[in-house]
Structure formats: structure tokens, C-alpha cells
Image: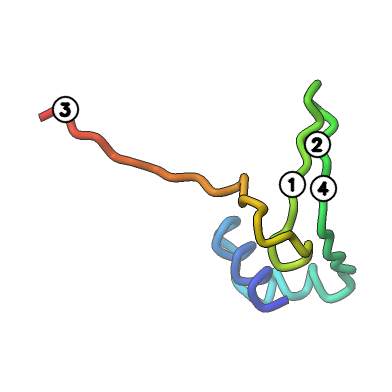
Amino acid sequence: MKSITAALATRFHAPLPTIRKHLQDAVIEEWGKVRRIDTAEGDTMHAAAQVKGGDDRRDATFVRVCVFSNM
């Protein structure tokens, strides 16, 4: 809850006590898999900490970012 409070305070530029007040009755659920239904493909996203994968399974959520300079 501390991480969520800090993230929301940063995102909305609000003081922590204000965010805590709004989150005091919050119910937080953890999901291992989420399927997006707003696309024709129906992408499934897995939470690495929640879903057990095989040793030979690749993490398809890994993204590599490269910065190129046109100098």
C-alpha cells in the first residue's frame, strides 16, 4: 500500500495524507493473468511474480529501448 500511495501522490502531485485518506477503504486485488479484450488479438499479460512459468518459457513482456543519435 505504501508503494501505491507514493506512486499516486507523485502522479497527481498530491500530499501523502490526502492519498492515504482516499485509499483507507480500498480493496486491492492481485491478478496473475490479465487478458485485454479491447483488441482483436486478445493479448494476455502475465505477472512474473504470480504466474509460474516453465524453464524454457521466454518473457514476452521484455522490452529493449535503444537511443540512436543522428550526429
Q: Which residue is mark 4?
A: 34
Up/down of 34 relative to 69, above or below = below
Q: CA distance from mark 4 to mark 1?
A: 5 Å
Q: Are marks 3 and 1 in contact (CB under 8 Å)?
A: no
Depth-wise, is mark 2 or mark 1 nearer the camera? 1
Q: Residues within 10 Å of mark 3 (few under 14, many from 20)?
A: few
Q: Amino acid at mark 2?
A: Arg
Element under label 1? strand
Q: Identify the residue at horizontal 89%, vertical 73% (top origin).
A: 25
Residue on which disc 2 sits: 36
Distance from the alpha carbon under mark 3 to that under mark 1: 35 Å
Labels 2 & 1 near each other (Cβ < 8 A): yes
Cβ atoms under marks 2 and 4 closer than 8 Å = yes
Numbered tag placed on residue 21 in the rendering: none
Residue on which the image places disc 3: 70
Please state the horizontal and vertical placement of residue 21, each as a whole percent of the image. 78, 74
- Within 10 Å of the Cα at label 4, are there few (<14), some (14-19), or many (20+) other Cα atoms? few
Vertical relation: 59 (above or below) 55:
above
The amino acid pointed to by label 3 is Asn
Spatial separation of the CA atoms under disc 2 and disc 4: 7 Å
Looking at the image, tell me whether mark 4 or mark 1 is earlier in sequence order: 4
| Element marked by disc 3 | loop
Q: Earlier in the sequence, mark 3 or mark 1?
A: 1
- Give the residue at the far left of this rendering: 71
Q: Split into 4 quadrants, where in the image is the C terminus?
A: top left
Colour scheme of the picture: rainbow
> Disc 1 marks which amino acid?
Met
What residue is shown with label 1? 45
Per the model, the C-alpha gap separating discs 2 and 1 is 8 Å
| Number of residues whose C-alpha sits closer than 10 Å to that of mark 2, classed few (under 14), some (14–19) or many (20 or more) | few
Q: Position of residue 45 (x, y in %)?
A: 74, 46
Callout 4 secondary element: strand
